[in-house]
Amino acid sequence: MRIYFCGSIRGGRQDVIIYQKIVQTLKKYGEVLTEHVSDSNLSDTGEDAVQDGEKFIHDRDVEWLMMSDVIIAEVTQPSLGVGYELGRARNMNKKILCLFRPSSGKSLSAMVRGAIDGSLFQVRDYKEEEVEGILDEYFRV
Ligand SMILES: O=c1[nH]c(=O)n([C@H]2C[C@H](O)[C@@H](COP(=O)(O)O)O2)cc1CO
């Protein structure tokens, strides 16, 4: 199974420890195409700029989205890139799980929470300590 993990990069890296926990759990269930998102050495400037770097990142990530079987997105820290990925993935009719922590005091965008459809697009509110259990449950059904 190919898994695409989405998390904030230029939107802010404050949740990177949680991203690591999620990616470690996801690795039990398949290949995580975007493991770099959980790398604590990656700052909010993003991946190293190479020539045509932005286009390279965009095109590679859209291709990975197309290749993936499931998208897992941690959406607590708002990120334009994650929102874009979710919109593209939704249009590709991919299976999507968004994870949000209400304890952050933030309010999730209606364009994400309102996209739930009872099957392919799911949003789950969670507490940090619940994340492994939620993922285990999601992948076992
Ligand atoms: O360097 C990068 N590498 C990369 O793969 N992304 C993708 C993966 C993340 O799920 C998402 C983060 O978007 P943003 O940087 O707008 O927070 O975009 C984003 C960047 C920087 O925008």
Image (cartoon, grey):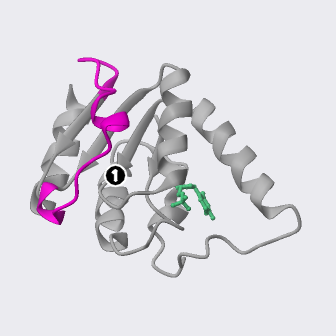
How far from the left and from the top, in percent, is residue 45?
Answer: 61, 76
Asked if disc 1 is less than 8 Å from ligand 1, the answer is no
Would residue 119 be found to the left or right of residue 87 on screen? left
Residue type pointed to by label 1: Val
Give ligand 1's quarter of the image: bottom right
Q: What count of labels does the image hold?
A: 1
Above or below residue 79? Residue 99 is above
- Residue span colored magenta: 102-121
121 lies left or right of 89: left
Where disc 1 sits, the SS reads: loop
Q: Which quarter of the picture shows residue 52?
A: bottom right
Residue at coordinates 76% horizontally, 59% vertically from top-left? 54
Q: Nearer the viewer, residue 6 or 139?
A: 6
Q: Position of residue 70 (x, y in %)?
A: 43, 33
Residue 38 falls within the magenta-colored stretch? no
Instruction: Residue at 18% x, 54% y: name it.
Output: 131
Q: In this orientation, which residue lies closer to the viewer: 20 or 31?
A: 20
The majority secondary structure of the magenta stretch comes to loop
Q: Nearer the viewer, residue 83 or 97?
A: 83
Q: Relative to residue 2, is residue 80 depicted above or below? A: below
Q: Residue at x 23, y 17 (%)?
A: 118
Q: Give residue 117's position: percent from left, percent from top.
A: 29, 18
Residue 109 highlighted magenta (yes or no): yes
Q: Quadrant of the C terminus?
A: top left
According to the image, label 1 marks what residue? 75
Q: Residues within 10 Å of mark 1 (few under 14, many from 20)?
A: many
Q: Nearer the viewer, residue 75 or 107?
A: 107
Question: Percent x, y for residue 134?
Answer: 16, 44
Task: Using residue 133 as the reference point, say whether residue 81 is left or right of it.
Answer: right
